Image (tube, helix red, strand yellow):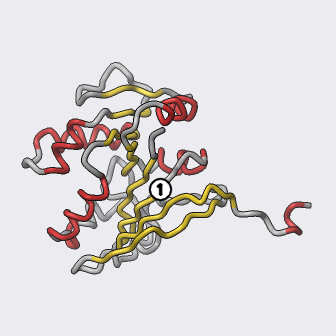
Amino acid sequence: MRTLKIIEHISLDGVIQVSNCGDDFPYGDWTAPYRTPAGAQAVTAAYGDAFDLLLGRRTYDAWSEWWPKAPESAIGSRINAATKYVVTHRPDSLPWGPAKALGADFIDKLQQIKARGNKDLILSGSTTLTPAVLESGLVDEILLIIYPTVLGTGKRLFLEGTPGRSFKLVSTSTTPTGIILSHYASSGEAIPLPLEQKR
């Protein structure tokens, strides 16, 4: 059984969008000023030595333009080698491989993928896909890379109406620029509604 892990760069007000992607988002890659070698090492360690990726189409397209040409690094080599499971309506155009397309019924397929193999399955970026996967209840772990900034606009990790679910804190660490890395594991429990709301 695979572990499904979400890894997101996130602002204090919950924004995970880091580029324009054709939307009206003014800040581009707002994470860049906070990067340090210590932060890069922590993120690389969080990904692990071998993993597969679950990506939305926009993230796949953006990453396919960067990672195959990026300067050589441990994380880059692992990302390029990973199998990319891509939620897309264009399954015939996935040149950055190995890649497999997941269509509209991706939650059912995701359950099957989780049940096979032993590599972690990592979901990163993918601002439209991530909330849908959170709603599915299939997420085992979340790593939030929290930046000391408030953006006020942009796509957020948790949408209104996301079902309540409990997580426990596994570890936390900081970088010299004030980034907090908080690692959570699912407790497997939904948060119960107050008694008056059940009626």
As rendered, which of 144 and 20 lies closer to the eye? 144
Mark 1 is surrounded, within 10 Å at the Cα level, by few (under 14), some (14 to 19) or many (20 or more) other residues, namely many
As rendered, which of 154 and 10 lies closer to the eye? 10
Locate residue 109, reporting x and y percent: 52, 29
Residue 11 picture quarter? bottom left
Specify whether 12 is left or right of 71: right
Locate residue 4, reporting x and y percent: 46, 46
User: From this viewpoint, which residue is outermost toward the left?
Assistant: 71
Locate residue 83, reporting x and y percent: 31, 33
Identify the residue at horizontal 42%, vertical 74% (top origin).
12
Identify the residue at horizontal 54%, vertical 34% (top origin).
111
Identify the residue at horizontal 15%, vertical 50% (top origin).
74
Specify whether 115 is left or right of 32: right
Seen in the picture, residue 145 relative to 7 is either above or below; the reply is: below
User: From this viewpoint, which residue is outermost toward the right?
Assistant: 199
Circle 1 residue: 141
Position of the C terminus, as image quadrant, is bottom right
Disc 1 element: strand
Residue 10 picture quarter? bottom left
What amino acid is at disc 1? Glu
Identify the residue at horizontal 19%, vertical 40% (top origin).
65
Locate residue 149, reporting x and y percent: 35, 77
Specify whether 67 is left or right of 101: left
Q: How many marks?
A: 1
Seen in the picture, residue 130 relative to 199 is either above or below; the reply is: above
